[in-house]
Amino acid sequence: MNVYFHKPAISQPIVVKMLEAACACAQDLGTSVNVAIVDDGGNLKGFIRMDDAPLLSGEIAQNKAYSASAFGMPTSQWYPMLEKNPALLHGIVHTNRLTIFAGGLPILIEGRVAGGIGVSGGTGEQDELCAKAGLAELETYLRS
Amino acid sequence: MNVYFHKPAISQPIVVKMLEAACACAQDLGTSVNVAIVDDGGNLKGFIRMDDAPLLSGEIAQNKAYSASAFGMPTSQWYPMLEKNPALLHGIVHTNRLTIFAGGLPILIEGRVAGGIGVSGGTGEQDELCAKAGLAELETYLRS
Amino acid sequence: MNVYFHKPAISQPIVVKMLEAACACAQDLGTSVNVAIVDDGGNLKGFIRMDDAPLLSGEIAQNKAYSASAFGMPTSQWYPMLEKNPALLHGIVHTNRLTIFAGGLPILIEGRVAGGIGVSGGTGEQDELCAKAGLAELETYLRS
Amino acid sequence: MNVYFHKPAISQPIVVKMLEAACACAQDLGTSVNVAIVDDGGNLKGFIRMDDAPLLSGEIAQNKAYSASAFGMPTSQWYPMLEKNPALLHGIVHTNRLTIFAGGLPILIEGRVAGGIGVSGGTGEQDELCAKAGLAELETYLRS
């Protein structure tokens, strides 16, 4: 019987690098976003709101990061799954903090969910690109 | 005139057995779930989150157990009832904690609702199978 | 620069054993309690309410477990620290879920906070004894 | 009659520098903290939780930053003011998010409140030192 096991957790300096990479991507795309990173427990680890990013999106970015971490799945994958299942579509959207549109991605390390990154402020496509830029930054460090 | 009456209530050791039976079923199905059991007052009596179960589903499992107990009906029976009644469909889903998709089952003893069991983390089908495994465990003890 | 690090996490079967050990201790003391265990992210991992335990204490047990995990300190150590600091005493008690009385203990593995156990329903002394019984059960498995 | 006016607002790159300066100060002091920066609207602009910082303090850091910005005063100055006024002491602490102990400082630019920085995780003294380190970083850029 396993008494305990180990969970990977991203370190603080990498969290800052990921936030900055996501913001740089938004700047390249000509938009302004909020970026949030949570750990595997869904708790906020880092956050940045760009200077002209919509205020409303601050909470959405945090909820996207939470959703991606707490379910281990990109937030963009929820709707295609829900549209075939009306009970779930009408029901599960009431779950606290669950976000079912693009812009949240799980952070995977060693095959385990180590957290989530959520971006909000641009279009769904832009938000997801920025979140991917954050993950790409992590990948660079993981490979080095 | 009845001055008072008795309500059946599941005892703590059986609650633990039911939680473990539901988890064992999830393991057999190759998934990881959260399992919650509430009493007839809708209050949490027991809970387990399996090691790789999605965090998001912890609250959903509790809400399924609550819904099943608080309405005395499997949560899977809500949607077929709601889809014919759009006012209800758009309205009642805002009821606090009401869950309208599979995975919550009432616990019945002597024809009365003694609580509810809710499972979340797998597909709706898997969740309901795990909840049934929990009830089956109770049945074993009721018959013995 | 550390890219990531590892956090210890208690496995589900041990969580059940710890819950049962805490309940057994309460039974020995002639009281009935609620026992909650959270992981290092403060999220509920396991919970049991004994048959005659006060309902009100269900939430308190969860908050004690949360507080112990989220600050890495027994909840009983808050008041001695606060009574010398009136600003903190009047202020910090408003922190969400923070519990400043006995019954919550951090779960430490490899020198890191891996979660918390919270017990509520008896006196502060009884609650803390039950929480210690839960930790003692974990110790047995860690040593074996 | 002034039709409109300008409010100073800290830019995103400086927010990151301030967060990092506060974290570096915590490291020098041998502690781990959460650091939050809000703008003049009290809305989160940036946040970092250090790797071993207590989870519980994440919300407190945000509330300190909010309080400092929303009242334009260091949070440490509340209690000396409240202790002479028991009605206020027992009443105002129930104000949402108001924090009345050290660790939150207003960010002043051109004599106006441009936001707040809040630090939590160490002692009150340590938290305030870290918040001051964040402000000192801003000063460096303002002077250059």
Image (cartoon, coloured by chain):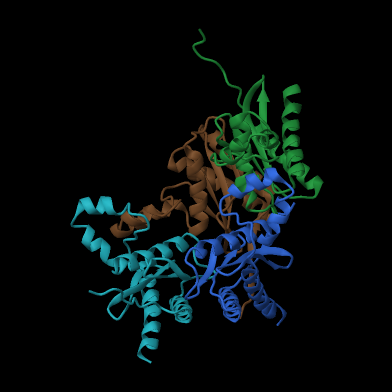
Chain colours: A blue, B green, C brown, D cyan
Which residue is at the far left? D84
Q: Which one is in front, A73 or C78? A: A73
Q: Residue at x 67, y 25 (%)?
A: B108
Quadrant of the image for the N terminus of chain D?
Answer: bottom left
Residue A93 location (% of width, % of height): 61, 49
Quadrant of the image for the C terminus of chain D?
Answer: bottom left
Which residue is at the far bottom? D144
Is B9 above or below relative to B91?
Answer: above
Residue B138 location (% of width, % of height): 72, 29
Q: Residue at x 61, y 69 (%)?
A: A127
Q: Residue at x 69, y 52 (%)?
A: B53
Quadrant in the rendering for residue D5 = bottom left
Which residue is at the far top? B1
Residue B144 appearing in the image: no
Quadrant in the rendering for residue D4 = bottom left
Residue D118 location (% of width, % of height): 39, 69
In the picture, measured across the screen, residue B17 lies left or right of residue D64, that is right
In the picture, measured across the screen, residue C38 lies left or right of residue D11, that is right
Q: Which one is in front, A111 or A119? A: A119
Residue C10 appearing in the image: yes
Residue A96 location (% of width, % of height): 56, 51
In the picture, measured across the screen, residue D33 lies left or right of residue C27, that is left
Q: How many numbered discs?
A: 0
In the picture, measured across the screen, residue B13 lies left or right of residue C103, that is right
